[in-house]
Image (spheres, helix red, strand yellow):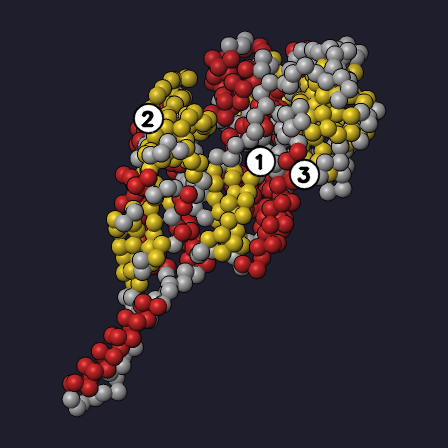
Amino acid sequence: MELIRNFCVIAHIDHGKSTLSDRLLETTKTISEREMKNQALDNMDLERERGITIKSHAIQLYYNHSNGNKYTLNLIDTPGHVDFSYEVSRSIAACEGALLLVDASQGIQAQTISNLYLALEHDLEILPVLNKVDMESAMIEEVSDQIIDLIGCELEDILHASGKTGQGVPELLEAIVNRVPAPKGDPKAPLQALIFDSMFNPFRGVVAYFRILNGTLSKNENVRFVNTGKEYSADEIGILQINQIEKKKLHTGDVGYIITGIKESKEIKVGDTITSVENPCAEAIQGFELVKPMVFAGIYPIDNDDFEDLRDSMEKLQLNDASLVFEPESSVALGFGFRCGFLGMLHLEIIQERLSREFNQEVITTVPNVSYYSYTKKGEKLLINTPNDLPDPTLLEKVEEPFIRAQIITKPEYIGTIMNLCMDKRGVLTKQTYLTTDRVEMTFEMPLAEIVFDFYDRLKSITRGYASFDYAPIDYRASDLVKLDIRLNGEPVDALSSLVHREKADPFGRRICKKLRELLPRQQFMIAIQASIGAKIIARETISALRKDVTAKCYGGDITRKRKLLEKQKKGKKKMRQIGTVQVPQKTFLEVLKIND
C-alpha cells in the first residue's frame, strides 16, 4: 500500500486535462510511441471532435522514483461538464489526491471551483497545477494569485506544466508521489470496494471499475452489491491499463475491474459497494445515490416504421450510459416514440448525436422540459414529466418547479448585462464576490426550466465568452405555471404543449403561432392557429384558404349565375372545414421545436 498513489484530475472544460493525461502516459511509458494518439483516454470519436470527456476513464501508471522505489499510480480521469457531476463525485471518492488543473491563459472558472469543493468534502490532498504555461497569453502571476486566494496554498506549492510540450511533467510525477498520501485501509477487514464507473463490453457484459477501501478480492469469489442486493461470482478481476490485465487477487488500495457476466447495466450502479458474500462488511460506503434525470424530452423516429429499430438502438445506448432513462409513449401528432430523461442539455445533444452516428437513427426531439410536482385539492402529490400529465386547472392546488443555484464567474464590465439576462430568466441575485480586481463571482437562484434552452449560449454571447457557468439543484418551489396549448382549428396538438410561467405565456404563445403561420402549408380551407391557456385564447394567427376562381368561366351575362357558384363554393368550404383535419408535416415540427434555440 505504501507504493500506491490514487489521484484524479479536476478542471474546467478545455483546460487541457486530457492532453496532460497523454503526457503522463508518455512519460511513464504506459503507452508505446506506436500506440500513442491525442486524447488517448477518450475512446469516442465524439469526445475527440468536441474536445470534451463524456465518460470518465481510469488507468494505471508505473513510476520509478528518485528514491529507488517503483510506485503504482492510479489516474482516475473525470468528465469536466456540469451535467456529469455525480460521476465526478464518485471518481473523487475513490482517490486520496487531486490535481487541480487551471489554464494559465483563462484563470479559474466556475466548474473548477465546484469540483474543488467536491474534492475538499472528501478530504483530498490538492495539488494545484498551472497548465499551458508555454502559451504567449499565459498570465502566470495573476492566475497563481487566484489559486492562492482560492485554496490558501503557498506560491512554491503551485506546479507549472504544459500538456502540449510536456514541460514540468517529471516534476508533477515527483510531486504526486511526495505529496499525495498512500491509501489507508485494513487488508484483514471484510471486503469493501467502491464502484466509480462501469462500461459495457458486447462479449463479456457489464464491466465495473472499483477501488478497494478495505479487505482483498480474489478471482471466482462470491460477491454482493450492497445497494442492489444482487449476488454474483467474480468471473474475472484485474487492473486497468490501456488494455485490461487479469489478476488472481487485488488488495486494499488497488483500483481494478470486475466482470460478473451481468448483461444489464441497470444492475450495476455507480457509487454502489462490493462486498464478500461469506464475510460481508458492516455498512455500505457513504454517498451512494440514484442518478436523477434533470431534463426530459420525447424522441420519435421520423418514419413510424422505424420505431422498433429505435427501441433497439436506445437499449444498446443505455448499456453504455446507465444515466439515460426512457419509456415508450405515443403522441397523436408524432406517433410512437420514447419519453427520455437526461442529466442536462449536453447529455441530450450527445445521445441525439450518438443515435445518428452509431445507429443511423434520425429522430425528432420534442421541446425539452424539466419535471414538476403538482398538488391537487384532494392533497395528492403528482410527478409531472410532460405538460399533458398536468391535472385540470379546476383540480389543481399548486405546482412546484425545481430551482438551482447558478454560479457565474466573469469580468466586472459584464455585471449589468448578466443581471438583466438572469432577471429576465426569473433569477434572484444572492451573492456577489470579487475573486480578484478583474474577476467577479455572482450567485443566482433561478428555475431550472429557464436555463434549459438558450441560457448558456446567450451568456457566452453577451460576455464575448468571458463568463463561466456552473449550477447545482437546490429544491422545489411553488410557481405560477400554466399549460400552454397550441390548437389548429380548435384541435390541440399534444406535441406542441408546454408548461410556462404565466408572465411569459403571452409572448411565447404569439411566437409559436407566428412561426406556425409561416411554416404550415395552405389548405383548401381556412386554418385558425391559436395558443390557449385552458379555455382562454391568448394568441391567434389565421392561414387563409386556397381559393379556386370558380367564376372564371362566367363572362358577361347575369350576376346571379356568379353568386350561385360562389354560394355553392362557400358551402363546400364550410363542409370541408368541418370534416377536414390539418396535417402537420414532420419538417414543420422540427422547425417549430427549434423556436427555443
Image mark for residue 264: 3
Judged by depth in the image, the label closer to the viewer, 2 or 1, is 1
Please provide percent x and percent y for residue 259.
75, 32
Horizontal and vertical percent position of residue 71: 76, 16
Q: Amino acid at mark 3?
A: Glu
Instruction: Answer with left or right where residue 324 lies relative to residue 418.
Output: right
**Placement of the N terminus among the 4 image quadrants:** top right
The amino acid marked with disc number 2 is Val
User: Rounded to the nearest whole Å, what is the CA distance between mark 2 and mark 1?
Assistant: 30 Å
Residue at 58% from the left image edge and 35% from the top image edge: 323
Q: Secondary structure at mark 1?
A: loop
What residue is shown at x 73% (from left), y 38% (from top)? 205
Q: CA distance from mark 1 to mark 3?
A: 13 Å
Which residue is depicted at the point 34% across and 49% down?
485
Label 1 sits on what residue type? Ser
Q: Residue 206 occupies which quadrant of the picture?
A: top right
Q: Secondary structure at mark 2?
A: strand
- Determine whether 227 is above or below 553 in the image: above
Decide: is 366 above or below 84.
Answer: below
